[in-house]
Image (tube, rainbow, N blue to C red):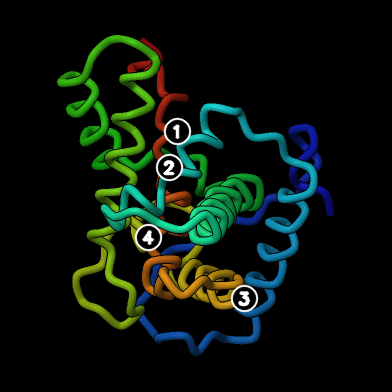
Amino acid sequence: MRLFGQSGDAERRPAAAAGPGAGHRLTPDQNEVVRELNGLVMEGMRELAIEESTLGLLQVGLPYLTQRDCSDAAIVAGQTAARLGYLARAAEYAMFDAAHELDDELLDLLAGRLDDSGPTPRATEDTVAELAAELALAEPIEAAAADRGPLWSLPGAEGELRVALRDRFSRALSRPQDVSLDELQQTWMYGFFLRGLQECFEDEDMSG
């Protein structure tokens, strides 16, 4: 099933509402969805072209989040984690009808930030990246945390599935000594939120 091709290629799933947390213990049906999403992300890594400007934002995610100098190996690991998160949201967008519903709270937050930024495309990109980083840093790593953010509320897949996919990818990455697992997980979420925020521009009020 190809979901990164032309519109209409995919068999869309109905909305998946986020339910109460169950840590990383997923039902068989949830595990199957995670496997499907995993396959789509891998397909996207091979075939989905990402704009150069977005690739640049994905590359700087880790050093921006950590606010420190990172080794070349850490930069590569961070860019890979961010790209996997970005593609995870792209997979949701192709797989779930609910992912096409804009989150009003996130839309309003982004609109307010854009009102305070410059009118240039570069200023807009920087604003989107800064907000994505802010959301990633504010989102708790643990699935059982009470203070959940957009990783659980953004329309699309269930929060448990996102956490499972994030952990599967981040734990599989080759991790240099100067970057922690938590930092790679945050960088994955940065990429996920970057894609989610870019989707907001499909709203007419955001098109400028």
Mark number, residue 194: 2
Q: x%, y% of residue 107?
A: 29, 34
Which kind of residue does numbered mark 3 sit on?
Answer: Ala
Q: Earlier in the sequence, mark 3 or mark 2?
A: 3
Name the residue furthest bottom.
25
**Element at badge 4?**
helix
Amino acid at the residue labelled 4: Leu
Distance in Å between CA atoms under marks 3 and 2: 22 Å
Q: Is residue 126 left or right of residue 188?
A: left
Q: Nearer the viewer, mark 4 or mark 3?
A: 3
Who's the residue at 33% across and 17% down the image?
205
Name which quarter of the figure residue 139 lies in. Answer: bottom left
The residue tagged 4 is 151
Total numbered labels = 4
Residue 10's place in the image compared with 164, above or below, is above
Q: Earlier in the sequence, mark 3 or mark 1?
A: 3
Q: Nearer the viewer, residue 39 or 97?
A: 39
Label 2 neighbour load within 10 Å: few <14, some 14-19, many 20+? many
Report, in whole angstroms, how far the alpha carbon at label 4 lies from the one at label 2. Answer: 12 Å
Q: Using residue 163 as the reference point, say whether residue 208 is left or right of it.
A: left
Side of 109 where 20 appears, left or right = right
Reading the image, the residue beneath label 1 is 198
Residue topped by disc 3: 172
